[in-house]
Amino acid sequence: MKKQITFFFIPLFLHFLIPSFLFSQSPQGIPYQAVMRNADGSVMASSAVSLTFMIHDGAANGTVVYQEGHALTSNAQGLVSCVVGNGVVSQGNFNSINWGNGAKFLHVMMGTTDLGTQQMLSVPYALYAGACDIEVSLTGDTLYIGGGNFVIIPGISAANFPPAILGCMDNAACNYSSAATQNDNSCLYLNATCDDGNANTTNDVINSSCVCAGTEVVNGTFITGNGATDIDGNTYASIIINGQEWMQQNLAVTKYRNGDPIPTGLNNTTWQNTTNGAYAIYNNDAANNTLYGKLYNWYAVNDSRGLCPTGWHVPSDAEWTTLETNLGGSSVPGGKMKSTTGWNSPNTGATNSSGFTAFPGGFRDDVGTYDYIGYLGYWWSSTEYDSNYAWYRILYYDYSNVDRNGLTKPYGFSVRCVRD
């Protein structure tokens, strides 16, 4: 793309006392600033710029008495600053230029692009720069004129631009900021390894909350959470795994969070056809409720009145994935999650080393049939697959994987809650 610049030339003779009768003497350097812009007028923020300066004697096309180059980088406002006389010299000697003999013209090139030539003229305050202690700020946008006085250079100073909004500008990152105008290298990516700074954690990763967190361990034991109590008064222990706090039992509540009862006792036909929330107890046997909890259709999971206790929610598909990743990936964590009791033999790989304590509550299918208690455990996520299906997780009595699948919403599965 063709580049262009908006520039101004500041002929200040820095820290150099130049009485009028000595004006022909050589300055130490000539400050130069320019705002680099693309052809569409947008600034070339934080871009590499190569400038060549030539000083012509007598006329704009006169003999080149001096030439030097500068490799620069523009700031966030497209500004570049340098001092002519302090670059990489390719012709002449800056200190040998006879400033008192004829006019001098400054010619500027950016790469092979000619940016123009202009006559170098002294300005009144330049004649007394030393006496007035005139300085240019390090950022090149402010003139300090002694005695605490200063001038903001119009159109160039950062004071003339909106302040930069720092943030992550990569929309693939979980902490992407659409408002950011300047990348601050803070981008975080889901499941990327990290260090949470806690010596009592392992397997630190960026979790679904976009926070670096590890599996919390003290003396080899996973840290327990504060637990939860549902609206029926049922209490649930909890475990903290890489920053997520999970219930250690399947949900057994009979009411929504606001106190409304969840329908139950539905016959097979009603269960199959309802699009309202409902629950069942496996084979209507209260003993199954004690160990395995209740089986809820997805409509209960999705009900706006809230199935989990206050401060808790049914985990999303992404939160289940984060749990799996934190425990080693979908082919590993089944054994780490399964209770060592309550499963039919062989309960392959079961160690419950995560403390999740998964029990195999089986299911009630979409026509009302109960199956697989003691063999398989199914848990809903709050995430739809489409208008008819939703995502769930399954654990097996003879397998140590965790599998992710979608099934129709009338199915009755167990529910685990995770803290908000």
Image: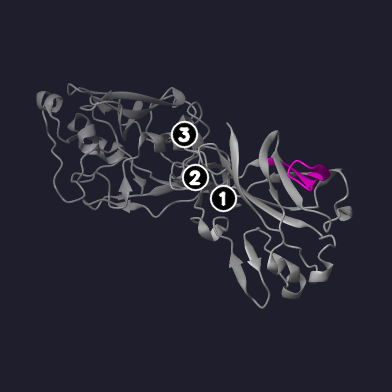
Residue type at mark 3? Glu
Q: Nearer the viewer, mark 3 or mark 1?
A: 1
399 sits to left or right of 144:
left
The residues bearing labels 1 and 2 have C-alpha atoms spaced at a distance of 41 Å
Residue for point 42% across, 36% down: 339
Q: Nearer the viewer, mark 1 or mark 2?
A: 1
Q: Earlier in the sequence, mark 3 or mark 1?
A: 1
Q: Earlier in the sequence, mark 2 or mark 3?
A: 2
The reply to whether dot 2 and dot 3 touch (C-beta < 8 Å) is no
**Label disc, if present, on residue 129 of the rendered structure:** none
Q: Which residue is mark 3?
A: 324
Name the residue that disc number 2 marks.
242
Extreme residue toward the bottom, this view? 147
* Left or right placement of residue 286 versus residue 125 in this view: left
- Which residue has dot 1 on it? 77
Amino acid type for the residue under numbered disc 2: Asn
The majority secondary structure of the magenta stretch comes to strand
Asked whether residue 50 is drawn in magenta, I would say: yes
* Image quarter (top left, top right, bottom left or bottom right) of the N terminus: top right
Q: Position of residue 341 (x, y in %)?
A: 40, 35
Q: Which residues are magenta?
A: 49-68
Question: Local crowd at mark 3 within 10 Å, few (<14), some, or many (≥20)?
Answer: many
